[in-house]
């Protein structure tokens, strides 16, 4: 190739590239305008013909201006089927459209965060877990309910789970006096599950205290049957129930001075930890340090454990003949206490929040759904569909249900014992410390004393670094 | 020497021709830059910008308030936090143990298998395909599969052991067994990667040298020691370097098999960064840890490159 033709080739290439870039810009400019509409739904709930409704919600057929369709970010969980049934009923009754974006637990937080950072959220309702809702309340990423409806009044039958619905921006935690930011949708709390057939055969009464749990575990542990199984993966939630039943806390706020105190390393903490460790190590299966919720459900459903404390939502699994060989033989009761009446069950609920970055009409449509979903009728239907309701009157009514009453009664009896984990924005850091230190203690990597002391020191540092007023650590 | 004319002395048509010529000259002079410009821009967008953001985040506290990202410069505060963080030294130690174990064992295993396959006269394609299978399975599936196999009560391994009268151990619940269990999964997953690279190196070696060695009376072990391995050294260095980089970033297998437990037995740096970033939402501190891990990996890369240069020299 001579010099001239080389030059010509270069120039032609340059011109071609320039044309390509120019045409790309032109195409982009002439293409469809950018849209803020949410992406295509992962699954749309089918919309049957509108029916007459008794729910106090504006419907697509009644109002001159129908409510816009809403999209709910919901986690894939054992209670999802119940929620889907509830949504279908809402669509059927009101004619308002709802789309569900079903997401595995591990993607929920990321999707929620991405939604509230966009110019307009793709979701109208976020389902927020107990461990991370604080960040969304504190940073104003969800809308206060009264900003959407100034006349909103929360029905007193709706359980607030130690004020998981509220945020007190002065104190920086969930308190009774806080502003309402979220509404509960799943009322998961812990229940004590036991094999009633084996207990009856051995003449054992339903344990009320940890001492009685241990006595039963001792009597019932055999080669194939564990006397008790602790939740080791992660351990913080179950341990906190033990801690609360002994009258202890991880952290405590002095309402007079506004100072926080780290109380994990206390005589109550030590008693709780020793009880938890003993039950786990001495009466648990050989892999006691590795059991998560799924493994625990499998152990009970396969008849390999006599008793355990687990989330109430696990109950339907024990009655499912496709999963369980102990159908009809599992009973539930409130989580035992250190002493009679000192029972404690931890709240592990989900709340629904409405993102801050939505136009008013989408916020109204989202709140209309929540209002409807929390009515007694809707919650009764929700419970019968396999989900965990959030109303006390529903639990009490369902306690007599021939199919679900065995555990719904335990839920009704447990709500007065509800305790909450620390509810500040630094909770995920505190939980990380608790999980690590408890897990180390469970496998004897460190002593129980070290676990509490080191854990308390780390939590104290977390609070101090975050700028809270914290009392000096009592060592 | 460039010929220039005064445009004012030329007719409009000539003046236009001069301008076209100048543009043509400009294109000729800068053509190479225009051709690589898209690549440079893409690289800047995809590599430099995120890296700069990571460095910026690692010296900042980053929060999201009302949908707005709020940055606050904190200097070396995260370094101080890392120095006092009890998880960091444990995670670093576990990561190093994991990296050293898997890189050494996988290299050794892959070398043996590659030598055997390269000398095999039959079914080389079959062996290569079979060895490729673990690498094709997504890490999530591998973690789940092994989690089920390791299950103490229902897992295949313990049930198989029970058939011969052995009570299987608690693979992932025992702090002494948890890391070896994960290393075993990693060997299953990644040995094939090393195998493919080493086999390619062996197959590209000139066979005449081996033949010459044999003619000169060298035994097979002498050929391996004095001919094959020295010639294979650059390939081995590359394979080990790549595998080290991947091993430092191990996440999926540990996340699914043990979640870092029991206790802190399998806590590694990547897993802790995920925890700090995703669960605790401490973006600045997580970025600092990520940058630290990248620096450690870079040190290893520099070390391997020096060895590689020496091997080639």
Image: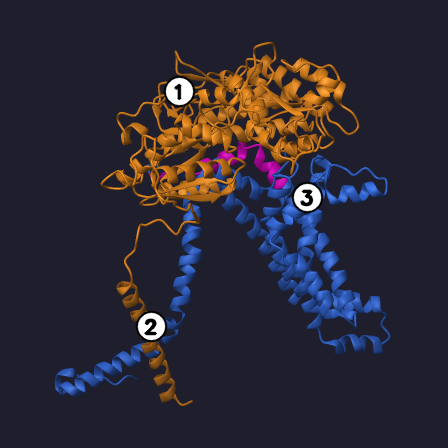
Chain colours: A orange, B blue
- Nearest-to-viewer mark from 3 and 2: 3
Count of marks overlaid on the render: 3
Percent coordinates x, y for residue A435 in the rendering: 58, 29
Question: Whole-Å distance between the Cαs marked 2 and 1?
Answer: 61 Å
The quadrant the N terminus of chain A occupies is bottom left
Percent coordinates x, y for residue A400 in the rendering: 53, 20
Determine if residue A376 is in view. Answer: yes
- Nearest-to-viewer mark from 2 and 1: 1
For image coordinates 39% across by 20% down, the residue present is A175
- Nearest-to-viewer mark from 3 and 1: 3
Magenta span includes A446: no
What residue range appears in magenta? B67-93
- Nearest the eye: A380 or A171: A380
Residue beneath disc 2: A20
For image coordinates 55% across by 19% down, the residue present is A264
Residue A175, numbered label: 1
Query: Subunit of mark 2?
Result: A
For image coordinates 45% across by 42% down, the residue present is A110
Question: Whole-Å distance between the Cαs marked 3 and 1?
Answer: 43 Å
Residue beneath disc 3: B148
- The disc, 2 or 1, on the residue closer to the chain's N-terminal end is 2
* Co-location on one chain, circles 3 and 1: no
Percent coordinates x, y for residue A350 in the rendering: 46, 31
* Co-location on one chain, circles 3 and 2: no
* Co-location on one chain, circles 2 and 1: yes
- Secondary structure under tag 1 reads loop
- Nearest the eye: B247 or B15: B247
Residue furthest to the top in view is A340
Determine if residue A426 is in view. Answer: no
Magenta span includes B89: yes
């Amino acid at each position: 190739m001579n010099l001239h033709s080389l030059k010509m080739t270069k120039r032609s290439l340059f011109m071609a590239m320039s044309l390509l870039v120019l045409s790309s810009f032109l195409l982009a400019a002439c293409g469809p305008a950018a849209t803020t509409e949410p992406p295509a739904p992962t699954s749309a709930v089918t919309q049957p013909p509108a029916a007459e409704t008794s729910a106090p919600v504006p419907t697509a057929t009644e109002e001159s201006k129908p409510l816009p369709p809403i999209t709910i970010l919901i986690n894939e969980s054992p209670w999802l089927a119940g929620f889907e049934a509830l949504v279908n009923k809402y669509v059927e009754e009101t004619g308002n459209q709802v789309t569900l974006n079903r997401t595995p637990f591990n993607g929920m937080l990321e999707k929620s965060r991405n939604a509230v950072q966009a110019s307009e959220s793709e979701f109208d309702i976020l389902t927020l877990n107990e461990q991370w809702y604080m960040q969304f309340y504190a940073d104003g990423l969800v809308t206060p309910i009264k900003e959407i409806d100034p006349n909103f009044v929360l029905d007193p039958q709706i359980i607030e789970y130690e004020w998981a619905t509220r945020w007190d921006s002065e104190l920086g935690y969930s308190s009774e006096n806080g502003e309402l930011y979220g509404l509960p949708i799943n009322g998961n709390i812990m229940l004590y599950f036991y094999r009633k057939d084996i207990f009856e055969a051995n003449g054992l009464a339903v344990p009320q205290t940890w001492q009685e749990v241990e006595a039963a575990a001792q009597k019932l542990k055999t080669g194939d049957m564990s006397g008790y199984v602790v939740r080791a993966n992660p351990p913080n939630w179950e341990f906190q129930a033990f801690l609360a039943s002994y009258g202890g806390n991880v952290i405590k706020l002095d309402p007079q001075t506004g100072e926080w105190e780290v109380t994990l390393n206390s005589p109550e903490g030590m008693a709780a930890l020793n009880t938890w460790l003993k039950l786990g190590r001495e009466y648990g299966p050989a892999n006691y340090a590795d059991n998560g919720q799924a493994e625990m459900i499998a152990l009970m459903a396969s008849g390999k454990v006599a008793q355990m404390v687990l989330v109430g939502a696990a109950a339907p699994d024990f009655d499912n003949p496709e999963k369980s060989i102990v159908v009809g033989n599992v009973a539930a009761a409130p989580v035992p206490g250190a002493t009679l009446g000192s029972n404690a069950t931890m709240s592990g609920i989900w709340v629904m929040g409405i993102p801050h970055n939505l136009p008013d009409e989408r916020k109204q449509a989202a709140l209309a759904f929540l209002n409807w979903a929390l009515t007694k009728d809707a919650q009764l239907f929700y419970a019968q569909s396999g989900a965990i309701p959030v109303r006390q009157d529903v639990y009490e009514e369902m306690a007599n249900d021939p199919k679900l009453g065995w555990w719904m009664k335990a839920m009704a009896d447990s709500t007065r014992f509800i305790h909450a984990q620390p509810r500040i924005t630094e909770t995920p850091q505190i939980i990380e410390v608790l999980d690590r230190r408890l897990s180390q203690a469970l496998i004897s990597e460190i002593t129980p004393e070290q676990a509490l002391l080191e854990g308390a020191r780390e939590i104290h540092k977390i609070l101090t670094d975050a700028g809270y007023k914290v009392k000096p650590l009592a060592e | 020497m460039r010929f220039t004319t005064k445009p004012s002395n030329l007719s409009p048509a000539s003046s236009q021709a001069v301008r076209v010529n100048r543009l043509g000259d400009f294109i000729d002079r800068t053509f190479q830059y225009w051709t690589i410009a898209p690549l440079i821009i893409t690289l800047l967008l995809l590599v430099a910008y995120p890296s700069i953001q990571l460095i910026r985040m690692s010296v900042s506290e980053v929060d999201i308030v009302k949908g707005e990202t709020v940055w606050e410069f904190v200097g070396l505060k995260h370094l101080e936090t890392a120095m006092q963080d009890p998880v960091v030294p444990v995670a670093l130690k576990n990561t190093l143990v994991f990296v050293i174990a898997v890189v050494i064992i996988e290299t050794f295993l892959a070398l043996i298998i590659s030598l055997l396959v390269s000398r095999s006269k039959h079914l080389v394609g079959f062996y290569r395909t079979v060895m490729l299978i673990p690498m094709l399975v997504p890490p999530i599936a591998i973690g789940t599969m092994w989690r089920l196999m390791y299950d103490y009560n229902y897992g295949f391994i313990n049930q198989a052991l029970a058939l011969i009268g052995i009570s299987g151990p608690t693979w992932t619940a025992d702090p002494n067994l948890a890391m070896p269990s994960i290393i075993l999964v990693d060997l299953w997953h990644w040995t094939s990667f090393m195998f493919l690279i080493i086999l390619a190196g062996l197959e590209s070696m000139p066979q005449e040298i081996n033949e010459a060695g044999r003619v000169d009376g060298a035994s097979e072990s002498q050929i391996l020691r004095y001919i094959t391995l020295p010639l294979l050294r650059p390939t081995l260095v590359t394979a080990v370097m790549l595998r080290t980089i991947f091993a430092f970033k191990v996440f999926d297998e540990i996340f699914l098999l043990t979640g870092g437990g029991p206790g802190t037995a399998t806590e590694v740096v990547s897993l802790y960064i995920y925890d700090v970033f995703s669960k605790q939402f401490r973006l600045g501190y997580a970025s600092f840890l990520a940058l630290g891990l990248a620096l450690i990996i870079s040190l290893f890369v520099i070390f391997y490159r020096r060895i590689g240069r020496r091997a080639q020299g």
